[in-house]
Structures are given as C-alpha cells and as structure tokens.
C-alpha cells in the first residue's frame, strides 16, 4: 500500500523509489510474471522515503533523497551454523542508523525513458562474538563501518516503426557492498539440485567478516534486456533476459571461511572456497487483455546457476527438503519454468 504527500517539490511517505530505473523486465516496463530476480526495484508496494525533485525542463528531472535501507546479509563467518545451501547467510547487521541516501537523473521524452541513480549504502556490523569477556556485547569490538555503493541505469525506447506500442530497453547495475541494489533485490542465495547428486549453488551478501577482522565488501553487477511487440492492441509478446554476477575478494576466498565445517551447517568444501556465482535467465511471455483491466498471461523462462564451486565435492550435513545428507558434486545447472496468470485490476495502469 502506498501513501505519500507531495508538496513544493518534496515527496514524503511510502511510494515507488525514484532510484528505480526503466528498462527492467518487471511490472514497470515488460510485465514479467516472475519479476526476474536480477532487477533492483521497490515493486508495487514501494518504500519509505523522503525526496526532493528539481524540474530541469524538457522532460528531465534531478531527484535527491533517502530511502529505507535495503540490504542483503552481512555475515560474521566466525559464527557457527550461519551458512546453509539454498539459504542466505544469517545477518549480523548493526542497528538501523539512518536512511540510504541517493541521487537520480530521470528523462521522460517522446522517444522513451532513461534513468540513472547513484546510491550510498552504509554497512555497519554488530559486536564480535568471541575474543572478549562477554561475546556479542559492548565489551567486544566490531568492524569499522564502511560505505558500499551502487550505480543503476536503465532505458526504455519506444519503437513505433516495429508496431504501435512496441518498445525495447535494458538496464545495467554495478555495486560494491550494495548487493540488494546491484545484485538484484529479488535474488537470494541460489541452490539448484540436479540428477546424480549434483547441486549448483552460491551465496549473496553485502559483506562478510571474521571476529577481530574488518569488513570485506561483496561486488555484484547485473544487466538485462527486454522487447515487447503488440500483435493486436490488447495482445502482446515479450522476450527478455537477465544476467547477474556475484564476486568475493581474494581475502575472503583464501580464508576458506565459507567452507569451514564449524561454520557451515550444510556445506563443507575441500579445496578453493569461492562462494561466488553467475545467475541468468532467458524467457518470453504473452499477455492478453480480453477486456479493460483483465489480464491473462503465460510465461516460459529458463534459469541457470553457474557456481564457482564447479567440480568440487559438497557435503550436506543437514537435509535440504527431500535431499538427504551426504556428498554432492557442485555443477552448473538450469531449469525451465512455466507460469500462468489471471489478473483483474480495479485501477488504471500496472
């Protein structure tokens, strides 16, 4: 639910963030049924924010403000049982100190839309959990705070030469210590089990650290495209794709902390311990509006996880659903999904 006040260039309240950019395969541009996970978007519900808008003329605006914090995990890898296959690591974020500041430039003209946003993301951890008289209290130290950052950009171009209503676009996001923005707001740590006791896996975080150590920020970037063609005024088909890459520093990889059996309740990997991964999707969907406000849609999508653990042996020490404990081989894998949707809307737009 959105509720906000706009006055003299200011916006106060709960609404769609100005940092959301066009060109993403989501409700704002290409109406993906699965809201593909690589995008950074606050969605239909929006977020709490305060913002100020300067009208620059000719469809251009400069926006500055602050939103409610969006984060992925901040993992203390010295803590037992915080790592599990298919789960985002338990987080050790400290108290919420202030909203996340940002700057955005938006262009909305006859040819289409363009947006670029810069975001500063504060990373602050709780106290260390060992090496002091009372672990996890103010008697312990904690890592120095760090600022992560992300730059988001996207474009959506009208294509009347291809057909009335046709449009195409794309986005590119890059960040360090801000994976909820540059690595996809919808993306969690993936695990995809395959035949023959194989699993494709990875872990997404904003940062990690060890007791007595400093924060190691995670690098993540995402890109995507979409094209929508209207066969009739009320029937359209879309093709889209996304790609996300999550990478950790050599300090994190060489420490082996992600694969320490004392830390991980569901993964212990001999050899190189790199929790990074690639995640990509390719899909198409068709929408039909038999009457105004009523939408029928079908979508087919291929999703693939490419794991940096490729070829290594994974030991599950805790069952994952119907998957028993035991040894598995890390291997890239993909899956095809089909979705159907029937939506009745009682307000214009989507």
Image: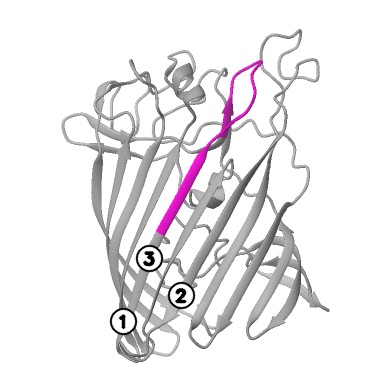
Question: Which residues fall within the magenta stretch?
Answer: 207-223
Image vertical order of residue 269 relative to residue 298, above or below: above
Where is residue 68 shown, x and y percent of the image? 70, 54
Which residue is depicted at the point 31% across and 81% down? 229
| 114 or 22: nearer the viewer | 114
Query: Can the viewer see residue 37 in this picture?
Result: no
Give me the C-alpha separation between circle 3 and circle 2: 9 Å
Q: Position of residue 227 (x, y in %)?
A: 34, 74
> Circle 3 — which element?
strand
As drawn, 217 above or below 6: above
In space, the residues marked 2 and 1 are separated at their CA atoms by 13 Å
- Give me the residue at 35% from left, 35% from top: 201
Residue on which the image places disc 2: 156
Residue 147 position within the rendered picture, expressed as x and y whole percent measured from the top left:
68, 40
Whether residue 139 is visible here, answered yes or no, is yes
Q: Residues within 10 Å of mark 3 (few under 14, many from 20)?
A: many
Image point 27% across, 33% down: which residue?
A: 199
| Mark positioned earlier in the residue sequence (2 or 1) | 2
Residue 143 in picture, x, y percent from top left = 70, 25
- Residue behind mark 3: 225
Q: Secondary structure at mark 1?
A: strand
In this rendered view, identify the residue nearer to me: 164 or 131: 164
Membership of 337 in magenta stretch: no
Q: Quadrant of residue 122?
A: top right
Q: Pointer 1: what residue?
A: 229
Crowding at dot 2, Cα within 10 Å, few <14 / some 14-19 / many 20+, comes out as many
Left or right: 264, with 45 as reference point: left
Q: Nearer the viewer, mark 2 or mark 1?
A: 2
Between the residue at mark 1 and the residue at mark 3, the CA separation in whole angstroms equals: 14 Å
User: Answer yes or no: do the residues labelled 1 and 3 have beta carbons within 8 Å?
Assistant: no
In the picture as drawn, the residue positioned furthest to the right comes out as: 8
Q: Residue at x 45, y 23 (%)?
A: 253
């Amino acid at each position: 639910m959105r509720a906000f006040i706009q006055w003299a260039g200011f916006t106060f309240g709960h609404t769609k963030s100005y940092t959301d950019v066009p060109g993403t395969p989501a409700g704002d541009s290409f109406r993906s049924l699965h809201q593909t996970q690589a995008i950074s978007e606050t969605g239909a519900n929006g977020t709490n924010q305060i913002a100020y808008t300067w009208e620059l003329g000719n469809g251009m605006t400069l926006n500055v403000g602050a939103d409610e914090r969006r984060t992925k995990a901040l993992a203390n890898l010295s803590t037992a049982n915080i790592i599990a296959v298919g789960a985002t690591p338990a987080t050790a974020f400290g108290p919420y100190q202030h909203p996340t500041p940002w700057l955005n430039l938006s262009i909305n003209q006859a040819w289409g839309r363009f947006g670029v946003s810069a975001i500063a993301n504060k990373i602050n951890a709780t106290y260390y959990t060992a090496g002091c008289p009372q672990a996890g209290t103010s008697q312990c130290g904690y890592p120095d705070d760090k600022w992560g950052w992300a730059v988001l950009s996207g474009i959506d171009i009208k294509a009347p030469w291809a057909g009335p209503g046709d449009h195409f676009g794309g986005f590119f996001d890059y960040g360090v210590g801000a994976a909820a923005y540059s690595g996809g707001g919808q993306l969690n740590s993936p695990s995809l089990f395959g035949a023959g006791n194989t699993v494709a896996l990875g872990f997404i975080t904003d940062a990690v650290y060890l007791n007595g150590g400093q924060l190691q920020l995670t690098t993540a970037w995402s890109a995507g495209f979409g094209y929508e063609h209207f066969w009739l005024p009320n029937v359209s088909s879309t093709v889209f794709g996304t790609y996300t890459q999550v990478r950790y520093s050599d300090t994190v990889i060489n420490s082996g902390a992600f694969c320490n059996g004392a830390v991980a309740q569901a993964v212990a990997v001999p050899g190189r311990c790199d929790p990074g991964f690639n995640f990509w999707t390719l899909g198409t969907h068709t929408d039909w509006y038999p009457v105004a406000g009523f939408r029928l849609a079908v979508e087919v999508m291929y999703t693939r996880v490419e794991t940096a653990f490729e070829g290594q042996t994974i030991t599950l020490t805790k069952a994952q659903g119907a998957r028993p404990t035991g040894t598995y081989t890390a291997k890239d894998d993909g899956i095809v999904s089909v979705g159907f949707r029937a939506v009745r809307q009682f307000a214009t737009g989507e």
